[in-house]
Image: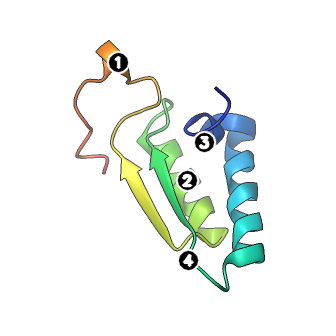
Amino acid sequence: GMYGAFLLEKDNGDAIVDIVSYLVKEVGHLIPISVKVRILPSGVEDSLKLYGRLVDAGAAMLTVHGRTRLQKTYKTGHADWDAI
């Protein structure tokens, strides 16, 4: 679908950054905004850049799932603990 980990890649990450910014603006004064992220298929460096943008947008906490969105069902494989 077009939700979840898909949003990390949509519009070069702008979609999820915009969502976080909006949530922080609207309810961030009431509750901390946290984001669960995966590693981008393009790699750890791109992932770190996006994570920085999410923190800059006001995310109070990131939880890193050590797999890409492509690693599911029989392709799950092991989590990338070095990346985490």
Q: Amino acid at mark 2?
A: Lys
C-alpha separation, residue under disc 3 versus residue under disc 1: 20 Å
Q: Nearer the viewer, mark 2 or mark 1?
A: 1
Q: Report the residue marked by disc 4.
A: 32
State left or right for residue 52 relative to residue 30: left
Q: Earlier in the sequence, mark 2 or mark 1?
A: 2
Q: Give whichever of 19, 17 is nearer the camera.
A: 19
Q: Which mark is residue 73?
A: 1
Q: Report the residue marked by disc 3.
A: 8
Q: Amino acid at mark 1?
A: Thr
> Residue 3's image quarter?
top right
Q: Earlier in the sequence, mark 1 or mark 4?
A: 4
Asked if marks 2 and 1 touch (Cβ < 8 Å), the reply is no
> Who's the residue at 55% across and 62% down the image?
52
C-alpha separation, residue under disc 1 versus residue under disc 4: 32 Å
Q: SS class of the residue under badge 4?
A: loop
Q: Amino acid at mark 3?
A: Leu
